[in-house]
Image (cartoon, rainbow, N blue to C red):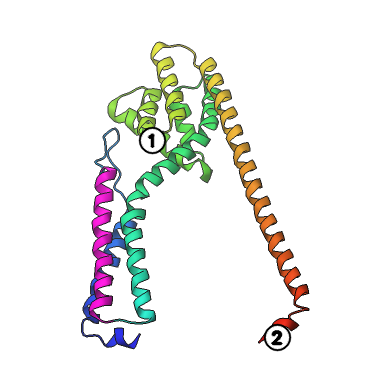
Amino acid sequence: MEDLLIAPGTPYFLSALAGCLLAGLGMALIAPRPAPAGSAAPRLSPAVRLATGQIAGVSLAALLLFAAIAGDVRGGARSLLMAAAAGAYLGLGLVLPRQPAVRRQREALALRRLTPGLIAFVRVGLGSFESPTAIMGRYVVQAHPRLAPMRQLVAEAIQIGQDRRLRPFAALAAAARPRGCRELTDVAEALAQSEAEGASAETVLFAQQATLELILQSEFKRELRRRTMYLLLMVAVSLVVGILINLLWIMTRGGAALMQLG
């Protein structure tokens, strides 16, 4: 470690590393600017994000490797720099470029789970002869934290309807399409069609709610069975390891044989 600290180029390498890390932290923490309602937000394609991340990851990893080689770093400090180079490449080259896609997948999954609740809320509102605007406004004022993804979408739909002068459910369909949740998009499209035709959406909503609830229940049961199998596997492995340790302890007469060998 002393060789790394007294190398002539160490301050410059550390300054460059600190600058790269601060720049990466700033890019990761910067809040995306909300796009105007109804407009397509300019987004980089996944290929461009991956290429940019690869360039940044390779550059930072090469800088760390060059610091280790040029500074003639040896021992634990060299291993530390090698590990930092590998971590920099994996973080900047693979993890960060996939963050937007991962966030969209999580949002779509959350919206999918909240869609049956939205359907029930709309059905109750339509059954009480409320207007679609009043139903959506009432949904937005709910304060439960778990409903935040759907509340944000409904609020965006209200804003889209005001800006583009669309019907409420048509605006809901326009806000749901970019989210990537097929079930929510189908429900919003059905509501928009019934709103445009002046027909009742009760039958369609009831069928979609029942189908989606069955799908979610079956997925929950599969996930529960999978986690049960993982738990049983962990218990079995722990039991086998415990039995082997006990057998080894008995065979060595409480460790006395190992002490004699030592």
Q: Residue at image x 52%, y 20%?
A: 205
Q: Nearer the viewer, mark 2 or mark 1?
A: 2
Residue type (three-letter) at the residue carrying disc 1: Arg
Instruction: Give residue 86's quadrant in the image.
Output: bottom left
Secondary element at image label 1: helix
Give the main secondary structure of the magenta stretch: helix
As drawn, which residue projects farthest toward the front? 261
What residue does disc 2 label? Answer: 259
Q: Which residues are magenta?
A: 45-72
Between 98 and 121, the one nearer to me in the picture: 98
Give yes or no for residue 71 being in the magenta stretch. Answer: yes
Q: Dividing the image into 4 quarters, which one contains the N terminus? A: bottom left
Give yes or no for residue 67 being in the magenta stretch. Answer: yes
Q: Residue at image x 53%, y 22%?
A: 208
Q: Is residue 200 above or below residue 249?
A: above
Q: Is residue 108 left or right of residue 17?
A: right
Secondary element at image label 2: helix
Q: Is residue 218 above or below residue 104?
A: above
Between 65 and 104, the one nearer to me in the picture: 65
Q: Residue at image x 65%, y 55%?
A: 234
Q: Is residue 143 visible?
A: no
What is the x, y in percent for residue 21?
30, 66
What is the x, y in percent for residue 177?
37, 30
Q: Dividing the image into 4 quarters, which one contains the C terminus? A: bottom right
Between 135 and 251, the one nearer to me in the picture: 251
What is the x, y in percent for residue 140?
46, 36
Res 179 label: 1
